[in-house]
Amino acid sequence: MKHIIAFCSVLLFSYYASATSLAEQADSAYNKEDYTEAIRLYNEAISTDGASSVVLYNLGNAYYRDNSLGKAILSYERALALDPSNEDAAINLKFVRTRIEDAPEDDSSFLSNLHKGIVSNMSPDAWAWTALTIFIILLATIAMYVFSSNVMMRKTGFFGGIVLIFIFIYVFAIAYQTASAYKSHDKAIVIVPTTNLSSAPRSNRGEKEKVVPIHEGTKVLIIDSLSTPDDPNVGKWYDVKINNSSRAWLNAADVERI
Amino acid sequence: MDRLKLRFIILFLAALSAINAVSQTSFKVISPGNVIAGRNFSLTFRLSNGQANAPKAPELKGCDLLYGPSVSTMSSSQYINGQMSSSTSIDYTYMYRAKEPGKVTVPEVTVNSGGKNLTSNSVSFEILPPDRQPQSQGHQSSSPQVSAIDPATHRPGNVSPNDLFVRVSFSKAHVMEQEAVMATIKVYTKYSITSFLVTQQPLFDGFLSEELPVNLEVNLENYNGQNYNTAVLKRLLLYPQKSGKLTVNSGKYDITIQQFELVNMGFFTTQRPIERQVTTESNMASIEVTPLPEPKPAGFDGAVGRFTVSTDLQPELLRTNEAALYTYTIKGTGNIRYLKQPDVKFPSSIDRYTPKTDIDARIVGANTTGTYKVDYTIVPQEAGKVLIPATPFVYYDLDKKEYVTLDTRSYELNVAKGSSTSSVVEQREIDNTMHDILHIKPSGSDCQHKDISYVFNSLFYWLTFVVAIVTLIVIAIVYRRRLKFNADIKGRKHAKANKVVNKRLKAARAYMNAHENDKFYAELAKAMWGYISDKLSIAPSQLLRDNIASQLKAYGAADQTVDQVLTVLDECEMARFTPHHSDQEVAKLYDEAVTSIRSLEDVKK
């Protein structure tokens, strides 16, 4: 009996949710320029109904309108991690990055740009299916090489197979990368207006230590973390890498993992 | 309209020249200039090209008429290019003595010349007080008196800087920034000057200056209780560019003056002029410039004075690729020469050429009046609605002491397609830089997932790979077998040989039992030939009686068996042409055939 009631209530709830879901309510709040309410509703929608690239993108927009650039960048990054083919999120992320204080890292080598461009063409699932399709074609070319008695066909099968092996490895790697991106949390965004980098995992003491500030919206790569229960100010430190070069320690509370 | 105007001007000029040729009759008074109290001066009325009685001597305030009129007549005639012209002038001079310092105005005087009443202009001059003498000094001052008549005072000696100096003066003591002020540089002298040289030009730092024409006219002026002969060296209109106390200097001059030396000639003394060079010191003058009040309104570009603004567009109907003229005219008084070009914001669909500025200003009093006209030549590039926005003109009104904004007309136009098309279509880049983030996308509830699951991570996906690989392997195995099978086609035939021969023998036996001998022999022959063909892998076309024997021997068959096979084949051949056979013969042949085949079977390998 209890189970039936629970089931009914779940059904009812899901019906209600499909009528006007939290995310849709958030959309209308956003359109009414009530951005704080929109942020609240989007976050609630994510925690109850789960995340989607679109909802995260919309949340990023709401944060931007609410002048929280760090959180906006964080949301866009999450939206892109979930679906690299979310073009709007990529555009807005690029735009918001021009608004933050610290210049974003310049990793625009030709190959990395090409790779990013290729990855952003399709969703992770589409990449997975593409990898599978290429694999089947690869098997077909192998079959062609092995079974055919025609020299031309065998040649085609052989060289086509070699090319396809490399393409398959690349596409499969993309499929793996995109599918695991949302689960990897090694990158983080600074969400407080200013935080200081320190050379050791302890609070700055005195003026001797050189303080390097970094600002809201900067992306850091987390390498290691260290809990410091004795430190009264900071409970946990992250060993981070900034702009692919400098290493430093950062208060874990000042950043949020993507 | 314009043509009418032009015609009128020509007529007017013609009339003027005609009058000139006839010689105009005029009557005027010549100003004596400033005079010093206690001195005599003369006042002259000049009648040109006329005949009249001497005018009545006018009553002058603070002056006594001594005598007059003394009349002097002057006439001249010219003969130029066959045209004779003559002029006469009569001067009536009255002598007065100035008594009291003050301003004197000569009233208008009327004379009758040839039935016409001529009225003189009125002039005014000043009677200056005599030089103040220093009270403390008992003896006669060495400072000379200003008088050309009395050279006795101009004794050679040191020239005091008080007797000869250059001074700069402003027409106003306080001005606003950008407000015009007249500066006059005058030389004050008590000596007669023979030559004059500028060694250092006057400096006007912080001003925009504009020099006015001066005519060197000597006048008397009382300055600091002393009378001087003065002459204007320079007159400038200055526009202060910054606020605060601004100072100008008069520059330095080398002046040569004339002094007289007494020469004793024995019985009498005579005077000899000597020249003396004096360098005047530079004098300073300062003026207080008040800044324009803050806050300055938007669009204010330094215009100070009083202006009116008008705009014009010719023609009103615009066509693409046809030029039109947009004129922005500022009229008024103030720093009109130093106005900046108004920034008319033409829409991007209109090409604009470098505007032409035309300033027509003249100096009236201590200010400049005129028009400042900017011509913008514009060429519309696209047909359709176009708005040339109003360009307000902001200036500071000196009388009202406030900023005034003048609105101009904005033109909302419909640009028609022009007949001429420009050969070069200029392409403009669309401004595609982002100014804001993109709008949100509608978040459908269906795409939200509690836990993110990708196809990549699903079991099904990986199973598909496995299935594909297994399929390929299976296909490969099947194919391999088939290939092996196909490769052994001879062996297959070989294996099939017994089966086929048994079938044929069975059929032959059936014919034998039915006593159909023809068919029996044919079938038996076929069985024999076919078996040998399959057994020895020889094509049926290559089968001959001779090579069968050698092939069978090579195959390792016993001679007996070979003979037996050949006997059966011969019998079959023979029997086909000998129709009648007994059943026994037939049965015997059949048995022989079967034994020969069996023995061949054993031979194999």
Image: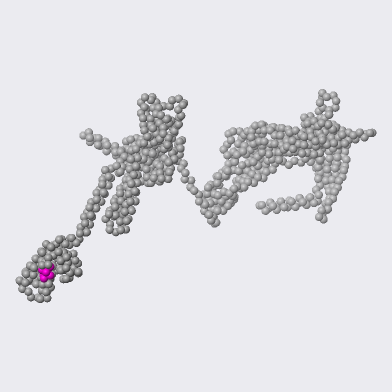
Judge whether B362 appears above or below B6 on screen.
above
- Look at the image and tell me in which quarter the C terminus of chain B lies: bottom left
| B359 and B596: which is toward the camera | B596
Percent position of residue A59, x then y: 38, 37
Residue B70 visible somewhere in the drawing: yes
Q: Position of residue B274 (x, y in %)?
A: 85, 36
**Left or right: where B441 falls relative to B143:** left
Q: Residue at x 59, y 38 (%)?
A: B300
**Residue A222: image x %, image y %?**
38, 34
Name the one closer to the observer, B113 or B104.
B104
Q: Residue furthest right?
A: B267
- The quadrant in which residue B202 appears is top right
Work out whether residue A149 or residue A234 is closer to the camera in this orientation and state it.
A149
Task: Indicate the position of residue B88 as horizontal and vertical percent values.
Answer: 84, 47
Asked if the magenta segment contains residue B567, the reply would be: yes
Q: Is residue A38 visible?
A: no
Count of numbered tags: 0
Q: Residue at x 37, y 34 (%)?
A: A223
- Please indicate whether residue A176 sits to the left or right of residue B24 in the image: left
Q: Residue at x 82, y 27 (%)?
A: B133
Residue A240 lies within the magenta run: no
Q: Which residues are magenta?
A: B562-568
Q: Is residue B552 left or right of residue B235?
A: left
What colouring style does the render use?
one colour
Q: Main secondary structure of the magenta part?
A: helix
